[in-house]
Image: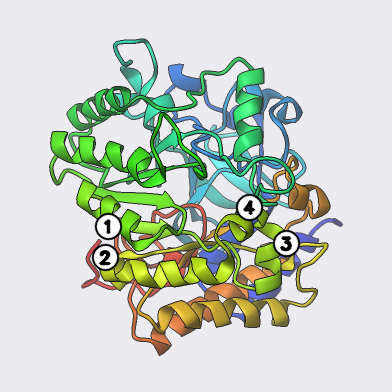
Amino acid sequence: MGSGSRTALVEDLMERFPHVPREAVFKEDLLRGGVAFDPSALSDNEGGEVKPKSYFIFSFDHGTLPELGEAALRRPPEEIVLTGGPYDLRRTVVSVRVNPSSPYRVAAGEDGMLGLYLDGRRIADVGVPPMPEYYRHKLSNGKSVMEVAPTIQWGYLIYLTAFRVCQYFGAKEECQYCDINHNWRQHKAAGRPYTGVKDVDEVLEALEIIDKYDTAKASTAYTLTGGAITTKVQGLDEADFYGRYAKAIEEHFPGRWIGKVVAQALPKDDVQRFKDYGVQIYHPNYEVWDEYLFKMYCPGKERYVGRDEWHKRILDSTEVFGARNVIPNFVAGVEMAEPFGFTSVDEAIDSTTEGLRFFMSHGITPRFTTWCPEPTTPLGKANPQGAPLEYHIRLLQAYRQTMEDFGLSSPPGYGPPGAGNAVFSVSSFMDSLPADANTPV
C-alpha cells in the first residue's frame, strides 16, 4: 500500500460511519490485519514485566512461528491498550495478532514510551498488560499458570482450553478458517509446552494460584473450551468431558467466577448436563449464517449435525439456560472469503443481519470474533487480506441497530459495554454498544 493510503481509508470510514466509535475502526483494522512489533515492544516472555501472548487456543497470527522472527522467541504482549494520540482515543483493549508486514507497528519512541504507528505517524499511546502476580507462580508439577489457565481481556477472563485439538480433522471436516489443530502442531514443533488434555486437578491448582494472588478480583469469568468431540475423550462425550471441569470448579470455588462453556450445539439433554454441572453461559457457535457458506466452510459441523439442526438446538438450549445466557459466536468476515463468499459488502451484511435478526427475535444475543486469516488455514491462504475493513465497520452498525430493534442489551459475562470501557478484545462489538450505567457486568 502506498504511503498514507491506510490512514486515508480509515479516516474515510470514520467520516462515513460517525455512529461507530473511531476506537472501533482502529480496533477492527488491527484485528483483521494484524500489527507488527518492533523488538523494543516485545516481552521477555514469562520472566519479564509484561504479560506475554499465551496462544490460548488459536494462533491469531498472520504467520507461522518460524515466520514471525524475533516475535517467535520473545512473545509480544497478550493484548495492547490504545489511548490518546491525534484521534484522542478512549481506552481500547485489542487482542494481539502478529503480522510483520502490517502497516501498523508498535514501537518505543525516543522517550522510551510505546506507541502505535500507522504510515509512519504515531496515532496512539500503547499500554501493555503488566505481568500478573499469579503468572509468577508454578504448579507443583512445574507447569506455568499461563499454560494451564491463561487470562485474557485485561485479566477479566480465565481461558481454559481443556482439549487442545479438534476431532473435526482434515480437509473434509475442519472449519476452513480454524487453525486449532495446526496451532497445536506448531507449538509442539517449537518445543513449547502445550498440554493436549488438561488434567482437572491441574486446572484446579492453577485456579487456586489465581484466586490467591488476584487480590483485586479482576478475573470475573472463566471459559471452558477446546476442540469439538465427535467420539469420546478419556471415555467421555462432549457434555461430560467439558462439564466435569465446571463441576470441579464450582465445588471448589462456589460462585467465584461466572462459568461459560464453548461447545457444539448439543441436544437439549446434554445442554441440561452443562447447566447441572454449574455452567452459567452457553456458547454454541454458529460460525457463519449463510446456508451454503456453512456447508462449505464448516464441513464437519454440517456433516455431523447440519445447519438446521444446529440452529434448532441453539433455540432449544434457551429453555435450559434462558435466552440471555445463550450467546453463540460467529466469525465475522468469513462471509466475504473466497472462493465461495459474497463479493459485495452489501450482500455480506444483509446475510449476516438476517442471522442476527433470527437469533435476536428469540432473545438470543450472538457475539462475534473478528476473522483473522491465519496462513495455515484454507481460507487464510486464499484470503491473506481478510475481509474489507468496511464490512467490519458496517457490521458493528448493523449489530447495534438490530439489538436496538429487539430491545436487547449487551450480553452477560463480557464485562462493561461502551467505547473506553470494554475489555472484550477479539472484536469491537462491546466497544460499539452504548455504555450503560445500569448494565450488569
Circle 2 SS class? helix
The residues bearing labels 2 and 1 have C-alpha atoms spaced at a distance of: 6 Å
Q: Earlier in the sequence, mark 2 or mark 4?
A: 4
Image quarter of residue 336: bottom right
Furthest-right residue in view? Answer: 2
Q: Residues within 10 Å of mark 1 (few under 14, many from 20)?
A: some
Q: Amino acid at mark 2?
A: Val
The residue tagged 2 is: 320
Between the C-alphas of marks 3 and 1, the distance is 30 Å
Rendered residue at 22%/35% (across/down): 248
Circle 4 residue? 300
The reply, left or right, for residue 250 in relation to residue 243 is: left
Which numbered circle lies on residue 272? 1
Dot 3 amino acid type: Met
- Residue 253 point in image, percent of width and height: 15, 37
Which of disc 1 and disc 3 is earlier in sequence?
1
What is the CA distance from the residue labelled 2 to the residue labelled 4? 26 Å
Q: Are marks 2 and 1 in contact (CB under 8 Å)?
A: yes
Left or right placement of residue 218 versus residue 24 in this view: left
**Residue at the spot x=55%, y=60% of the render?**
305
Q: How is the image coloured?
A: rainbow
Residue 77 vertical position relative to residue 72 in the rendered view, above or below:
below
Tell which tag, 3 or 1, sits nearer the viewer: 1
Seen at 56% across and 18% down, the residue is 192
The answer, for residue 158, to whether it is visible in the render is: no
Q: What is the three-letter code of the residue carrying label 4?
A: Gly
Name the side, left or right, on which 71 lies relative to 165.
right
**How far apart, in angstroms, are the residues tagged by discs 1 and 4?**
24 Å
Residue 296 is marked as 3
